[in-house]
Amino acid sequence: MASSVSVLLLLICTAAVASAQLSPTFYDTSCPNALSTIKIAVTAAVIKENRMGASLLRLHFHDCFGCDASVLLADIPGSFTGEQGALPNAGSLRGFDVIANIKSQVEAICKQTVSCADILAVAARDSVVALGGPSWTVPLGRRDSTTASLSLANSDLPPPFFNLSNLISAFSNKGFTATEMVTLSGAHTIGDAQCKNFRDHIYNDTDINPAFATSLQANCPRPTGSGDTNLAPLDTSTPYTFDNAYYNNLLSQKGLLHSDQELFNGGSTDNTVRNFASSPAAFSSAFAAAMVKMGNLSPLTGSQGQIRLTCSKVN
Ligand SMILES: *[C@@H]1O[C@H](CO)[C@@H](O)[C@H](O)[C@H]1NC(C)=O
Ligand SMILES: *[C@@H]1O[C@H](CO)[C@@H](O)[C@H](O)[C@H]1NC(C)=O
């Protein structure tokens, strides 16, 4: 008993020391142009395709539910199973090519110095900024994993059919409050979802605006299997602007996913949704703080892991 307590304390202390090592100035001397290189590439990618902003933000989010770039590791048939085939990821994660392009530009200026995990964290911030959202300072110094966990990716990422209590506990398992869960859900102010993820909501749920449901049904037929991958914007009013419209949509029962509308459905988070709907500034500052907190979730630091040469495979 005593020894397991001290092992636990040791783990907690190690984690605290590890996250304390992240620093916004981490690359200031080792690669002073890293951040500007990433920003230029992200901005270009988002201008080329608006939807890419949401894809890059989602990649960081799915990676962080450890911030170690494990999500970027591609499967190698017969020898390595990564996270890209996990249920919440399969067929829907995008932006790997953009990250690969940024990584090769960064490698060209600073050989094996900037981690893929840091590139993901910075690209997420730059994507939000490119779409008109808030900026924040990204603590840096994460290292890349040499492994990935399909089972963790399957069990930790919240699916669209979750109810409010499921959502609160999934985020609580990662150390987030219910308010921070509502805040991070605001990332759905950009991006699209696939029909298979909102079909039940638009045909079966009652907490949805009827005209909104009908308008979505045209491009998302009822039978499972038809139109499964057809897309609709998560924020129906301003799909490519990072703003607080997502919360105003919830007030008028126009959340696309069941799990979105659960945040404003007579439960304990209604007031947070009302607050963010009425105050863009409150949402912006809460979102920036929650993103920094998410980016600090169990990163590898110091001599842990490695700096990958190519984001899609270990060295
Ligand atoms: C939420 O879903 C879980 C099953 O995952 C269920 O046990 C629980 O009763 C539901 N909570 C509410 C408030 O509906
Ligand atoms: C809606 O609910 C019915 C009855 O529970 C179920 O059979 C069906 O698969 C659900 N989804 C859709 C899209 O109709």
Image: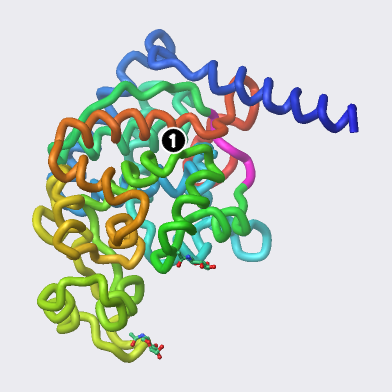
Q: Nearer the viewer, residue 88 or 274?
A: 274
Amino acid type shown at disc 1: Met
| Rendering quarter of residue 204 | bottom left
Q: Nearer the viewer, residue 55 or 193?
A: 193
The residue shown at (75%, 24%) is: 9
Residue 40 visible in the current orientation: no
- The number of callouts visible is 1
The stretch in magenta equals 143-147
Disc 1 designates what residue? Answer: 294
Principal secondary structure, stretch drawn in magenta: loop
251 relative position to 186: left or right: left
The residue shown at (17%, 40%) is: 44
Check if residue 145 falls in the magenta segment.
yes
- Mark 1 residue crowding within 10 angstroms, few (<14) / some (14–19) / many (20+): many
Check if residue 94 falls in the magenta segment.
no
198 relative position to 163: left or right: left
Q: Position of residue 108 (x, y in %)?
A: 37, 27
Image color mode: rainbow
